[in-house]
Amino acid sequence: MEILKPFNPFDVSLLLRAVEFAAVKHRDQRRKGVDALPYINHPIKVASMIANIGGVHSLPTLLAAILHDTIEDTCTTREEIEALVGPDVLSIVLEVTDDKKLPKSDRKRLQIEHAQQKSLDAKLVKLADKCANIMDICENPPADWSSERRMEYLDWAEKVVDGCRDTNKALEAYFDQTLKEAKKKL
């Protein structure tokens, strides 16, 4: 039987506040897949992968994972994130946030170009995010995405993750396995 380590109640409380905040912010959003799952499932999955696959239990990293799409995909402001979790977590969230004012092709190109310069925390979030997205595209793809479009996403995600290498062997191996299985299914 595994002995559970004591935990810091403040950390748990803050993580749960972040989950609640993200759930409220994403409350009207659904994933693009044919099942249209609640969007909040995605950031929870990303944080879970970081902790349970990557073995990373850093509170700032997990908080950033939970909040990683709030600024980009909701009306959340930087000030709200900073008030909730502080400037360090805000910094990580901003590192993984695309500028929606740019065309999609530019945003995708910049993710590839900037991946190597990201902090360790941002790379972890990016790695787990791409794993989760690939799983969704493979298991529950958007109805209007052809096999070709899905394959293009997989190839692009691989280029982004290449810039995040030498970050976390377990997450990288999981990504590689997930990508291999997804390509085989397509």
Image: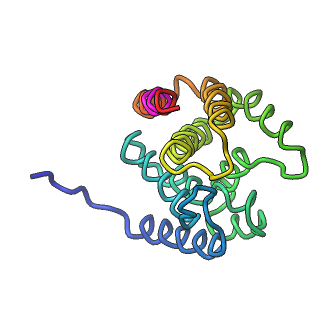
**Along the line of sight, the residue nearer the viewer: 4 or 51:** 51
Is 57 on the left-hand or right-hand side of 73?
left
Q: Is residue 26 above or below residue 109?
A: below
Numbered-mark total? 0
Residue 42 coordinates in the image, percent (x, y)? 54, 57
Provide the residue span drawn in magenta: 176-181
Q: Is residue 9 above or below residue 59?
A: below
Is residue 179 one of those drawn in magenta? Answer: yes
Q: Nearer the viewer, residue 99 or 83?
A: 99
Residue at the spot x=59%, y=54% of the render? Answer: 64
Residue sitting at 77 percent across and 36 percent down?
108
Residue 115 vs residue 118, the one in the foreground: 115
Residue lying at 54% horizontally and 40% vertically, measured from the top left: 134
Q: How is the image coloured?
A: rainbow
Depth order, front residue of 175/57:
175
The percent coordinates of residue 65 (x first, y second) are: 56, 53
Q: Residue at x 42, y 43 (%)?
A: 56
**Picture quarter containing residue 155?**
top right
Looking at this rendering, what residue extends furthest in the left direction?
1
Q: Position of residue 15 (x, y in %)?
A: 49, 65
Q: Main secondary structure of the magenta part?
A: helix
Q: Is residue 11 above or below residue 185?
A: below
Q: Check residue 178 for magenta coloring.
A: yes
In the rendering, at what x and y percent does residue 88 appear? 65, 53
- Residue 25 sits in which quadrant? bottom right
**Residue 84 versus residue 100 in the image, above or below:** below
